[in-house]
Amino acid sequence: MKLADVSIRRPVFATMMIMSLIVLGLFSYRMLNVDLYPDVDIPYVVITTVLPGAGPEQIESDVTKIIEDAVNPVEGVDFIQSTSQENVSIVVIAFKLEINGKDAAQDVREKISAIRADLPLEIEDPIIQRYDPASLPIMYLSVSGTMSNKDITTFTKDVVKKRLENIPGVGSVQLVGGSEREIQIEVDAARLRAYNISIQDVIMNVGGQNVEIPGGNVTEGSRQLLVRTMGKYQSVDDFNRVIVATPMGKPVYLSDVATVSDGVEEQTSLTRVNGKIAVGLNIIKQSGSNTVQVAQGVNKQIEKILKEIPEGISINVAQDNSIFIEHSINDVLFDIIYGGLLAVIVIYMFLANFRATIISGLALPASIIASFIVMYALGFTLNMMSLLALSLAVGLLIDDAIVVIENIYRHMAQGETPMEAAKSASEEIGLAVMATTFTIVAVFIPVAFMPGIVGRFFYEFGITISAAVIVSLFVAFTLTPMLSSKWLHREDEALSKEGNPLNKFLYYFNHFFEYLNGKYEKALRWSLTHRKTIVFGAIGIFIASFFLMGMLGSQFFPESDKSEFNVTINSSPGSSLEQTSLICEKVEAVLKEKPEITTVLTTIGSGNDPVTKANILVKLIPTKERKKSDKQIMAEIRSEVKNIAGAKISFGVQGVGGGGGEKPVTLSIRGEDLSKLEKIAEKVEAIVKSTPGAVDVDNSLELSKPEIRINIDREKASDLAVNPYLIASTIRAMVDGAVATQYKEGDEQIDVRVRLKKIDRKNLNDILPLTIKSNKKIGNQDFLVPITDIATITQDVGPSKINRYARQKEIRVDANLDDRFLGVVLGEVLKETAKLELEPGYSINVIGQGEMQDESMANMLLTLLLAIVFVYIVLAAQFDSFIHPFSIMLALPMSIIGAVLALIIFGSSLSVMSMIGIIMLMGLVTKNGILLVDYTNVMRERGMSRFDALVKAGPTRLRPILMTTFAMIFGMVPVALALGEGAEFRAPMGQAVIGGLITSTLLTLFIVPVVYSILDDISNYFSKNKKK
Amino acid sequence: MKLTFLAYREILDDRVSKALDELGIDYYTEWEEVKGKGHKTDAHLGNRPFPGYNNVRMIAFNDEDLLEKLIIKINELNTIVEKDDDKIRLFQVPLERIV
């Protein structure tokens, strides 16, 4: 082993090599950003198109379908889903994961600009956004006070928002809720009729008389002067003097037909924090900036603002993601530190030597710190996944050093000096240590490159763990032999049962181990003479593990208590903001009674949501300070709010990657005819409701919303030369209002909205006699046509939302879970839905977590297979044998039973995390076999018989096998026990690994030697036959 | 005149060099990383079953007193080396002429 030789001969050089890694590692650590999850490019593009005043059906036919048809041919589209609701069309295009999100968004932009002419003229420009998890808000602030809502909004917008936007790392600050200032021109319907004026005249004149146009330059002598026509409104009162029409040559002023007021826009959203009306601020960080640092900057700025703000205004941090990130990261660091300490204690128990323990323990910080270099070089962040890799690697990183130092120790015990032992032991064990490390890398590289969205999240995990174990191998061949040659003393070895209790304990522990070693040798001799019993026993255990697996529930990701959850409220279609708010107040009253709840943040109609949709973010006190879990609290609230009428109320927690919109059980029923879909959905909903464990069962088909339909008589309209577009836009201006122009006051641009008076808008009979300007003229006079002459009015009901998936209409039936696993509930639901007879063209599909679970399990099985193949390749190459890897790899199936048993005992499920644990086991459990087979080969090459070599190798390698196994187990104990907040998420991984390690270690101690001898017999048989 | 061959495990090279220095013997020919096996001792063949190599130093002596001092020194060194495998071997043969 050249590296070890050089390190022993040149200790300063070896120390400097490791020092350089540590210095670079510490430097890299300082540069690493902190985030909750890895920065994963999810190539989703969202197109939001607003068509003010349009109903869902019109949105679907005029906007959504046109956009869907346009973007469908874009390269790499996986599926398209859309929602057409009042005023808004939202089309989500999911691209295949290998497509770059930025390129996809650019392709979509090009397609949309090409079909812009096919979309209705009145649409606002479609907003095309790439889904970027990093663009989700990292903080939510609320500004509330005793001032009027308008004044609070103005203060928030002009002072707080602007100050926060200047903080380094803050990308943007969004204002939510609040009441924006608006100049309102409320037209009197009766007066319009009396003056025979159309509302379009009002809009046109208000807009047309607000001008400021540059008039060019005038040269006056040697000076050049700029000419500007100053026709802008200077004050709100100026609006009253606008001439809106001149019937019979007599001017009609705006004040004659309307009232002008400096008010606030009609409220379509509302924010309440702990029952108090507030203005919300979403803080979005710049891409690539450090969430925790940005949040610290925001908190500092808030402290400064609070000292300067007017009395009666308060600013509160309603939500701060950085707190959860800090807690999670501290928890993982706790796992790393305590796992490391436990692993070191295990080594001390076995070696009973302080110096040897320190030498092998040094491998831990050195490997972890050095892996920061790779993380920084590859642009990783310190996040849940990369840190999870390090916390799981704690037990592994010390392994190589343990194996090397244990062998050095053994050589010293045989009479070699530390220097000689370090050299010869490193040489002897080199191959085995390299083989164990490379099998771990062989397992984690396929994990890092696993297909699917889960693979993206595990990329940093796989690479970080691989980098860490490679560094640990380097340390084991440099620092460990070098320090052993210098520090170890042979006289330290002697253990005595005299002295302090620790010495006594170590004495008896090591004597117990010697006793165990003797017993193991006997048992191994018996096994080698009863090979059939051992082989059939192993096969039996392997088969049993599959039966046990059937008892395990399955889910996508383990659920964890994050001390917060969401309550989603959908009030009946047609409900006003006030009605939705009243329902929310009732729910808030229930929440207020719970002592575990600290913050209740209510938002109604935020973003593009209608006023019937509300979300309440409920924050709880930390898990350690309460007895009830989030699920228990949710269940209590669920039963208390079930009697609140007029709304559908459901609960949810935020999932991995920040998403929390979909419930775990989501079924998509697709087809063309909405009424047929409704019937199927009803049946599916009944099935889900009757399935135990499914709660908050709901469907996406919201109750129909009452509509007033104005049906244009095209013939009459044509006769009277009235354009249907003009009819529609006039009615929209009357009811919804139209922004005629903007009024400038200082730096502020304020919308000027023209619409009918509120009282006139309430009565349809007052609207319909109003006139629309015809293209015809009577003499010089405008010809005005009453709406009633060209249109009939009907009342009807229409869907309040139309969902589409893969360009078919869709109704979703979804449910939350209560104490049962997703796989189990979904299995029972699908069994029943399979019995439904569906017409051709109609289908029931699992989407959301269920679909992701199936997809990721398939990908994981592929990764598992790939990992096993890679392990074989590494072992075959290392041992230069096609046969030996098989005897080593027999440890793999023996680990499954332990992993499954551990998951059952801890009440965990088969999820992405536990599957990663099982894949990880494939790399870990080969180590025992490698140590056994490697030494057996050495002994045989020295001339021993096969039987003697196996009997010698087993007890000789028992100590390093148990040391490394216990170090790994204890290193992962903090992870498996899920001690921190949200730690349940990663616990199944640790549980599966611990269980698998225990069974595979116990079983491989016997099975590997037995199978080695059987395979050797087979090999001999074939080579004899060949010779013949 | 005598010719001696010192055969020893390569790991002991520092100790041998120190012993020669102390006796003022600054003339020798050395072969590094040679393979070999002694009577009833393990082989050092530089492979995994038999790891490690030997080094060999050839020294010619005009002064036989100095050779005796070296033999005493080697014996002293061998008392520290516990394993038989690792003890330093000195082979002495007559030397007829040095040109």
Image (cartoon, grey):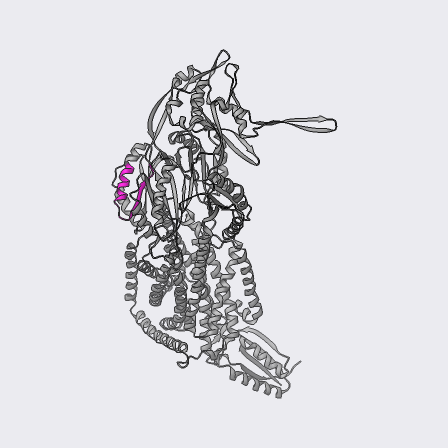
Measured as percent of width and height from the top left, residue A157 is found at: 51, 41
Span of residues in magenta: A680-701
* B85 up-or-down from A102: above or below: below
From the image, which quarter does the C terminus of chain A lie in?
bottom left
Measured as percent of width and height from the top left, residue A623 is found at: 38, 56
Q: Is residue A689 magenta?
A: yes
How many numbered marks does the figure carry?
Answer: 0
Q: Is residue A463 left or right of residue A520?
A: right
Residue visible at 37% across and 61% down in the picture: A977
Measured as percent of width and height from the top left, residue A120 is found at: 45, 28
Instruction: Give A399 or B96, whichever is nearer the viewer.
Output: A399
Q: Is residue B92 left or right of residue A217?
A: left
* A492 up-or-down from A185: above or below: below
Asked if one can make out residue A138 in the rendered structure from this viewpoint, the answer is no
Q: Residue furthest right?
A: A222
Instruction: Give A88 or A1022, whichever is nearer the viewer.
Output: A88
Asked if one can make out residue A163 in the rendered structure from this viewpoint, the answer is yes
Q: Residue furthest bottom?
A: B65
Q: Is residue A509 magenta?
A: no
Q: Is residue B43 left or right of residue B92?
A: left
| Residue A929: quadrant of the picture | bottom left
| Residue A959: quadrant of the picture | bottom left
* A149 up-or-down from A912: above or below: above
Instruction: Give A606 or A111, whichever is nearer the viewer.
Output: A606
Measured as percent of width and height from the top left, residue A770 is found at: 42, 20
